[in-house]
Amino acid sequence: QVQLVESGGGLVQPGGSLRLSCAASGRIFSIYTMGWYRQAPGKERESVATITSSGSTDYADSAKGRFTISRDNAKSTVYLQMNSLKPEDTAVYYCKALIYSSTGATSWYWGQGTQVTVSS
């Protein structure tokens, strides 16, 4: 069974930084695209940043210049460095990954989410 476990969320003041991590575990053969999504109260879940297995990245306009996505393939982990945080970044952040596992299928998996709150 494949699991994605996020960590690193918390309460931070406006202008501060946080680094989120998401580690994949289980009987995994390959991990393709990985990404971070967020959902604020009363809003739809939205993409924040994605990274392919070769390292190509894509960012939402709201994240460009402030957030950096990276991955460590040896650790099956994706990171999101968030700087210059704003109150509007407050949301539950989820990681998502496209994984080829021992089930023989390539499927998208979601983590359980980690809360990020930006407030003074």
Image (cartoon, rainbow, N blue to C red):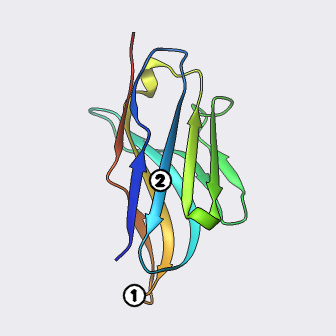
Q: Relative to 24, say whether 46 is above or below.
A: above
Closer to the camera in the image, 29 or 90: 29
Q: Relative to 28, say whether 39 is above or below.
A: above
Q: Position of residue 13 (x, y in %)?
A: 45, 15
What numbered label is drawn on residue 6? none
Give neighbour class at mark 1: few <14, some 14-19, many 20+ (Cα, 10 Å).
few
Q: CA distance from mark 1 to mark 2?
A: 21 Å
> Please, which residue is most extreme toward the front here?
75
Q: Secondary structure at mark 2?
A: strand
Q: State if disc 2 and disc 1 touch (CB < 8 Å).
A: no
User: Residue at position x 55%, y 64% from top?
Assistant: 76
Q: Which residue is mark 2?
A: 22
Mark 1: amino acid: Thr
Mark 2: amino acid: Cys
User: Residue at position x 40%, y 66% from top?
Assistant: 109
Q: Which residue is mark 1?
A: 103
Q: Position of residue 9 (x, y in %)?
A: 40, 36
Mark toward the viewer: 1 or 2: 2
Q: Position of residue 70 (x, y in %)?
A: 64, 50
